[in-house]
Amino acid sequence: MSGWILALIATVYVACLFIAAWFGDYRGSAFRKRWQPLIYSLSLAVYCTSWTFFGAVGQASENLWSFLPIYLGPILVFVLFWKLLVKLITVSKQENITSIADFIASRHGRSHFMAIMVTLILVIGVLPYIALQLKAIVMGFGQLTHDSLGPDSLSREDLALAITLTLAVFVIMFGTRKLDATEHQNGIMTAIAFESLVKLSIFLLVGGWVSWMAMDHINLDDAFQRVTKETTVDWFGNILMPTVMAMTAILCLPRQFHVTVVENSSIEDFYKARWLFPAYLFLLALFVIPLALVGNQLLGSSIPGDAYLIELPKRMGNLPMAVLAFLGGVSAAISMVIVATLALTTMVSNEILMPLLLRRNKYSYRDSNDFYRFSGLLLTVRRTTIVVLLMMSWVVYRLLGDSGSLASIGQMSFSAVAQLAPVLLGSLYIRESNAKAAIGGVLAGSIVWFFCLVVPVFDNVSWLDSGILQDGLFGYEWLKPGNLFGLQMTETVTGATLVALSLNTLIYLCGCLYLRPGIDERRQARKFVDALLSGDGVFFDIAITVGELEQLASRFVSKNRVLGVIQSFESDSSNLLFDSLDSDKQADPKLVAAIERLLAGTLGASSARIVMKSLAHGNVGLEEVQAMVDEASEVFQFNRELLQGAIEHISMGVSVVDRDLQLVAWNQRYLELFDYPGDLIRVGRSIADVIRHNALNGLCGPGDVEQHINKRLSYMQNGTAHRSERRRPDGRVIQIQGNPMPGGGFVMTFTDITEFRQVEHALKEVNESLEQRVQERTKELSLLNVQLLGAKSQAEKANHLRSRFFAAVSHDLMQPMNAARLFTASMELEARGTVHEALAQNISNSLRSAEHLLTDLLDMSRIEAGKMAVNLRELPVMDVLEPLKSEFSLLSRENSLMFRVVSSNKWIKTDPVLLRRILQNFLTNAFRYVESTKLSGKVLVGCRFLSSQQLKIEVRDNGQGIPLKKQTLIFAEFERLSTAVNGLGLGLSIAKGMAEILGARISLSSSPGKGAVFSVVIPLAKRNVIDAARINHKVNNSDIGLKVLCIDDEPEIIKGMTNLLSRWGCQVHSAQGYQEAIHSLDEMVPDLLMVDYQIGGQINGVDLVERARAMLGYEIGAVLVTANQQDGLRQKCRELNISYLTKPVKPASMRAILNRYEAESKRVETS
């Protein structure tokens, strides 16, 4: 037969599909309502692909009963496990599910990762199945045309490409016109139903004709008996496992989920399809065995079994019958490709591409333009996805080549989608199902499937190293695809499926047992697992007779209406419940649902559902149900009166119409706004009459009256929300807003916004006059901003000058202060035991006071500049309190005060230097004011354990106390409680600043005449494992035998340092500046360098120490004595092992450093 003629016939058939799809899209709702159950039932036959049409005969020709599972599996599901499908449909409708990936992800906390994983697995598993359809069409074309279209023949690959592009155009035209994936694709479903009729009719026609013609030449009974005796049936490998795979496929194949669940518009349609679809499968399987027997007898092994259906009529001389067989296969293949592509496109776009588009955040959705741009882009993405998926299927078709029969490729896809069955079933029946368990199980099963079934296919076409099949992965025998884990698979597909499903199920169930589901997963579990207990649209399977049901309903609804519902089921040929009204017969669930809807019209949906649930559980009698409903009716009436009272007391007019567009409720304000005649507004009045009255009185604006009526009725009929404004002839402005109600009906609100519009108009006039004033104000503000910028610049300049001033103070004032302290220390030693001792002590105290004042000023400057360094570490709190105890104990004795420090074994994490300064300021303040009271003063320091993480250190005194109005003021700079007390008033301000730097909290509690309590709260630390015992170091008053080189650029400081160190027994050498220091190091080798930071010139004290160590060849001890407080200097000295002393130097601190260096020197000499 000419290829061009066959192509023309196929093109005409595809055109018929276009017409059928167009017809389904544009026919009215009445047509769809009448034929929808049949269309839905036939669309389920998309399950029957070219594998079922051609491949079933091929399977039977090789093994007579091996074709049976592909029919038996779906029949078992629809006949025995139909409640599973009811639950699946119910949950999907409640959750607005669009695909199987959406279903599984939604059940498990709406896991995006799971949705992507399921989508990718289905794409990988279904693409070979789509390629199978292309292979079937090309095979049939080749059988009829001998692979030639004419002189300029097309290759098989080119033919497959042309078919692919044609199908892409069809799916794009009728499958991507709507954004909402849950909207029914009426056109495509009509085309699929048409194709289902075509392929069934053709199969029965060709099978019957071939069987009839063969009866003259072949005894089919004898052939059947002979084949059954010769055939050995592997019941597990050929029947049981393939049946299980077919049962999972009817649930998990994307196209089956789409037509069964997504495209379902009524549960009633499913109840009809429950019997129609198995009957369809039975008819389609009727002639499989006869065709296989005739093919084996007439054609034998010379022709593949998949081609028998076309080749047999051709060999018998009936070419038109062969062409019909080809069209039947084309119909089976095309329907599968269309729906599978549509389902995969929905998953890929919704679960992968759409989230990527949304993350770009390009569209704000604030106006309709953004929405239309986005919707246009989304439709483009879906259409592009369709083309890409079909082109990928064509690529897979080319890669597969001639490897594998139609049945083997189909079984491979069935095995892939079967990996979703445990999770799908667990989603509906296992409350503990969770995302981690589901992901683990599906991934494990899919990996085994890919390794055992996909790898061998590509191995055969030389894509992979053939050593994988022979030697196993990485050379391991137990990792061979046909011998995985040492399990020999005689039937590769069924064996691999069994291993994959077993591993999948085991991991999934273990995850459900040992992993806890999240909050969202538990919430979704209630919706999915309990769907049949509470979901709308699910009919109860109640053990109640027709008489009892009629008796119950008649108590709330007239008996005639109840009998009318029962009689409608009696007369419905598709719902024959009984031959006559048999009161003792069990009521059908659909009749129960109909009675529930009847009761809902009187009692309300919730009360009717309560009645039915009570009967379903069997724990409430009819009399109790009646009493319960009577009570519910009273509540319903009360709520109705309450609602009417509520709408009567709102300022806007309200009117409500039911689904039949009749007026059912309104309020008085509604009547006042429109001044209706007394007889116009009543319950049951058609809203069209009310609109006509308004239009005739000019309340709807200019235009034709009928146009106004039709426009407003269309809003209500279509459930379209709308908002508008109307200016009345009397000048009033009425805002009108309409909103649809769930289940039908419409609510209209009317608001008098006249006053609002008047105010709005006045505001517009004021706004226009404001423009000039705004310009004037803008000019004034611009001038003010310029002035503020100038003031800010001056303030910043003053702040910079102040920082420079304090930097100068920190060095220039500290230098003479340091020299004075050194001279005073020497004088104290010299005057010890003489009449001048008291004088020397007074001078030292005065210098110390001056030093404290200067230190306070410098600390205040560093706090304000944010340059106060913090060195946090963990230490015992007594390491801070002990030195304070020693320092202030002497002061307390001199001033006859009682001073006590309560010991604590707690460890803290803080900067000990800053914490000591805070407490020192608290103590100084306490001693100062306790002394001023001239009483028996007491000062106490103690620790209070607040929690496992905080410790409060308190300083208590019994001084004069602080008035409440001054308790905040005293923390300000230069503020003192009494002018009679010495000091600058900086101590508490500094303490507050240091506490803020530490992140600590200070507080004050005081009452006049009762003393004061200052406290600071600091974090606790864990006590170290090794707690070094405290050692009381006694001052070593013996001479220090160190040779010290003192380096400074100030002669007075060198002189004071030399005087003091000499009295301590040191051998002192001095150098003024860098050059003298280098010269001295050439002449002698000191034990210790005592260096100022600023020694003149470009070299500083730290640089000098590094150069001295380089000259001497070892790390000589060094002490940096400086008034420089720049950031990082102390840290740098710590890194270079240089001791650090700040000016003015405390002799005790200097003596302690010298003692340490002397001890180290002696230790080195003895070692």
Image (cartoon, rainbow, N blue to C red):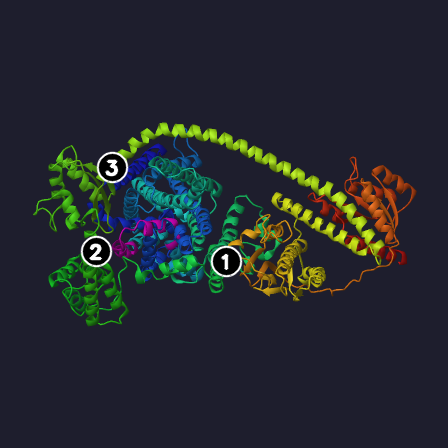
Q: Nearer the viewer, residue 187 or 1121?
A: 1121
Residue sitting at x 20%, y 49% = 745
Query: Residue 1018 in the image: x percent, y percent?
Result: 60, 58
Structural crowding at the residue carrying mark 1, measured as other residues with C-alpha within 10 Å and reported as few (<14), some (14–19) or many (≥20): few
Distance CA(mark 3)–CA(mark 1) = 85 Å
Please report the bounds of the magenta region as a residue range. Answer: 251-278
Q: Is residue 217 visible?
A: no
Query: Residue 895 in the image: x percent, y percent?
Result: 69, 61
Secondary structure under badge 3? helix
Q: Nearer the viewer, residue 563 or 799?
A: 799
Distance CA(mark 2)–CA(mark 3) = 30 Å
Q: Earlier in the sequence, mark 2 or mark 3?
A: 2
With 96 as the anchor, is 649 left or right in this view?
left
Circle number at residue 490 = 1
Q: Mark 2 or mark 3, which is nearer to you?
A: 3
With 110 as the anchor, is 998 left or right in this view?
right
Secondary structure under badge 2? helix
Magenta-colored stretch includes residue 1121: no
Residue under circle 2?
A: 643
- Amino acid under disc 2: Leu
Q: Is residue 217 above or below residue 802?
A: below
Q: Nearer the viewer, residue 1011 or 214?
A: 1011
- Amino acid under disc 1: Thr
Q: Nearer the viewer, residue 65 or 228?
A: 65
Q: Earlier in the sequence, mark 3 or mark 1?
A: 1
With 279 as the anchor, is 131 left or right in this view?
right
Q: Mark 3 or mark 1, which is nearer to you?
A: 3
Decide whether the magenta segment is chiefly helix, strand or loop: helix
Circle number at residue 757 = 3
Q: Earlier in the sequence, mark 2 or mark 1?
A: 1
Tell me where residue 674 sits by quadrant.
top left
